[in-house]
Image (cartoon, rainbow, N blue to C red):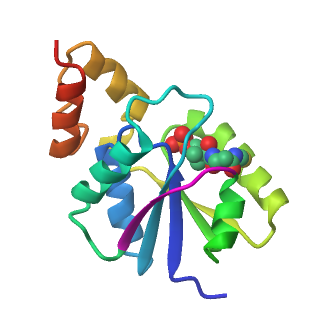
Amino acid sequence: MTVHSVIYPGSFDPLTNGHLSLINRALRMFDHVTVAITHNPKKTPLFSVEERVELIREAVKNDPRVEIDAFEGLLVDYARRRKEHLILRGLRAVSDFEYEFQMANMNRTLDADIETVFVMTGEDYYYISSQIVREVAALGGDVSSLVPPNVLRKLKERFAR
Ligand code: PNS
């Protein structure tokens, strides 16, 4: 099977430069990337799904090859509805591995036609996570090198004292 498109799922709460770098690298391999935002029940969201969609749309500058969408329920059901066969995830540290391995295996158990591919995060983005960004921004720290400018503005607005 030849695959020209990929789903890049996540919470993106908020989008970081690490996510953006992965989207750009995916565009070198695929014609079309669907960034699929969903709620991770393990996390309390900072931004609504609508806000996250908007932030990503602005950050990718309306690139027609990037579609921003949101979904509820199982990722494999969403992929199946969209007739997509590939899920893209970024891998940072070894600590990501176990969780990603579990998810990829579970998703393959749920639907053997859907494969997960991993791309290693570039060394500049190794330490960035949305959670760290949220925490530092909430405490007034400078996250300007970690997120795109529009996300920075939104974080400042949200945590304005
Ligand atoms: O950015 P995150 O929070 O690490 O992304 C996790 C995400 C959203 C990919 C995962 O929680 C997910 O796929 N949620 C959808 C529900 C689902 O399919 N759960 C079973 C996955 S094994």
Above or below for 34 versus 13: below
Q: Name the residue nearer the viewer: 126 or 2.
A: 2
Is 133 situated above or below 92?
above
Q: Residue at x 82, y 59 (%)?
A: 110
* Residues in magenta, as a range: 66-73
Residue drawn where x is 78% and y is 51% of the image: 106
- Quadrant containing ligand 1 reads top right
On the image, the x and y values in percent for residue 95 come to: 58, 33
- 56 or 101, which is in the foreground? 56
x, y percent for residue 29: 43, 76
Residue 12 painted magenta: no
Front in this rendered view, residue 18 or 73: 73
| Residue drawn 29% across the image and 58% down it | 57
Q: Is residue 28 left or right of residue 9?
A: left
Q: Quadrant of residue 15?
A: top left
Q: Position of residue 100 (x, y in %)?
A: 64, 45
Q: Can you say whether 58 is above or below 138 in the image?
A: below
Identify the residue at image location x=39%, y=29%: 46
Q: Quadrant of the N terminus?
A: bottom right
Quarter of the C terminus within the rendering = top left
- In the rendered view, does 64 fall on the left or right side of 150? right
- Can residue 90 be seen in the rendering of this structure? no
In this rendering, position of residue 22 left or right of residue 1: left
- How many marks the image carries: the answer is 0
